[in-house]
Image: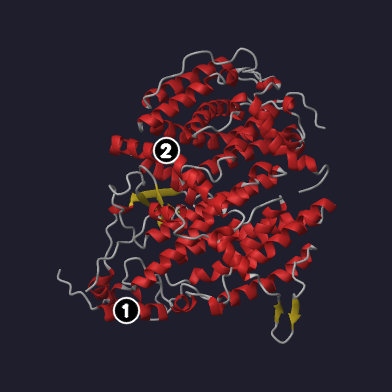
Amino acid sequence: MTNLTLTPALALGDDALVLSHRLGEWAGNAPVLEEEVALANIALDLLGQARILLSLAGDEDELAYLREERQFRNLQLVEQPNGDFAHTIARQLYFSVYQQLLFDHLATGGTELAPLAAKAVKETSYHRDHAEQWTLRLGDGTDESHTRMQRGLDALWRFTGELFEPVDGLDAPWAALHDEWTTRITALLERATLTLPQGPQRGAWTAGGGRQGLHTEPFGRMLAEMQHLHRSHPGASW
Amino acid sequence: MTTPRPADTPAVPAAARPTEWPLWEVFVRSRRGLSHTHAGSLHAPDAAMALRNARDLYTRRSEGVSIWVVPSTQVTASSPDEKDAFFEPAGDKPYRHPTFYEIPDGVQHL
Amino acid sequence: MTTIAPEEPALEAVFDATVAADERIEPRDWMPDAYRSTLVRQIAQHAHSEIIGMQPEANWITRAPSLRRKAILMAKVQDEAGHGLYLYSAAETLGTSRDELLDKLHTGRQKYSSIFNYPTLTWADVGAIGWLVDGAAITNQVPLCRCSYGPYARAMVRICKEESFHQRQGYELLMALSRGTEAQHAMAQDAVNRWWWPSLMMFGPPDDESAHSAQSMAWKIKRHSNDELRQRFVDICVPQAEALGLTLPDPDLTWNEERGHFDFGPIDWAEFWDVLKGNGPCNEQRISRRRRAHEDGAWVREAAAAHAAKHGKADR
């Protein structure tokens, strides 16, 4: 089994892997055909990033399919179930703004992640744009869409503090990134006639612990589904 | 007598289907130096989304470097019924084509 | 400008001559009403098949056993959404709307390919769909790239180009299973056993029972007969199955020297008609899932339309 010390590649790779999986659950369920294509594009970008990052940390399939829940290092935000379309867009918005800021920073650094970050930041800025466009339309669309969008933003707010918890081995100006993230989200929500959620950006116990391997209940089920076939045939090639 | 026929991309009466997004025609420049070519169409609520949907749909295999989107209702098309009047007059003006002119062998750069 | 409306017979003569010359009919050309309605039905059914066809494969995205396979499967299901979209666009040039067509699908007034009413029970089914179902679809579709209706033919060109990877990935997937563990090999064989006959049914009823064939052939919106294409498909598959190390579940499958084709056993047309009538294993499930996705998305579509109405050109 691959060495599971928390490398930055593992943390960021798990983020991409898990979010890609969640987006993959939308296949066949999107509100309109054009959006099927858009969501799949984002999921495929993220899966591509995950494969590169996990390969830096070990064998991609071993890491994806043979680790237990407590060994995953992804943010709790990305493992949250899809909910309605607004909920998914809120998750995309929080994550993609964060990921773009972080990758922008990493792309200019000298670490092993720089080349990946430089490539991924182009994808990520498109993901952010997609989330922003939809936030604007849902926020300032109908009463129903406004309510749903605000509800999604509020429900996921408690998972956003973790985005800026320092990751071991990853040199980044976390506080400054957090400020920039808040500025961008605030400005966008204002344009979208939405309100920046109030309240804590983390829960009392587990929220904020994804990087330490503490996850939320839905994650175990997600992994059970994702891993069962691979694990049913030990050692097989696919 | 002919019944009126829809245009290439007929507008759907908006009132009848309030939530059907309008249709957009997509033109893609496949690489620098080439003109935009009609790639197909799609539905989108507005121009900004039409452009993004076009990017996702028509360039996901790197088929393009630039995209135009045009509301289908904004395309004015020539009618095939006018084909003769519209296009035939151009047919008897061969002097617009370089092959019309005879140049002696050996003369170059013309 | 004064134009004198040409008489219908004259227009029909122009139409017939265009089709006879193997040229394309374009949206604004005059065309017989029956040609138009047949095309709408055929293109819509094709589009519906693409989007309903996403379901049996999407069923395995979250369980794909390697990240490489997962990426391939996601890209393939995405292509199907895209292909549905190209085809709805082609149908829209004939004066219908996507909403109208979706409504007909959701209410059972238009069909989709019956093959998608069969379930994907194991991972190997993803491979069998790629190899056999997409293989049959490609056999059907390649001639349609020369169909007489321009927008349909152009959509088919794009689709065939993009689908070339679909069949290959399925074949490669099955190859990995067939050469894998005993359990994997058995999984692959089981999938081929279940998908072979339904794939042969995809070409439609035998020529002498096919309702629309003759007229569609004359109009060049169908270029080969059902039986002709079915035979072509069988001939292609036999050596491919051999290379896979898998058996096609038909004891009557033998080379006929005289015909230069493989003979094959009788197809259970009773099953075909039964599934078509709605009694397949998944008819109800597929349509209700599609309907639910559409209904669940209504508020999203309304929101974007409302936003566009509010902001008009400001956001352009």
Occupied quadrant, residue C89: bottom left
Label whose residue precedes the other's in the sequence (2 or 1): 1
Chain letter for mark 2: C
Measuring 80% from the left and 28% from the top, which residue is drawn there?
A3
- Does the image show residue C136? yes
Q: Position of residue C158 (x, y in %)?
A: 51, 60
Task: Give left or right: position of B7 versus B53.
Answer: left
Which structural element holds mark 2?
helix
**In front: label 2 or label 1:** 2
Query: In the rendered image, which quarter contains the C terminus of chain B?
Result: bottom left
Instruction: Give the residue number, with chain letter if any, for mark 1.
Output: C12
Q: Amino acid at mark 2?
A: Val
> Badge 2: how crowded within 10 Å, few (<14), some, or many (20+)?
many
Q: Quick check: A163 above or below B42?
A: above
Q: Quick check: A14 above or below A32?
A: above
Mark sitting on residue C133:
none
Occupied quadrant, residue C40: bottom left
Q: Amino acid at mark 1?
A: Glu
Measuring 52% from the left and 43% from the top, which residue is drawn there?
A29
Instruction: Give the residue number, with chain letter if any, for mark 2.
Output: C300
Task: Give left or right: position of C242 versus B88.
Answer: right
Residue that protrudes farthest toward the bottom in the picture: C258
Task: Give left or right: position of C300 versus C264.
Answer: left
Label 2–label 1 contact, CB within 8 A:
no
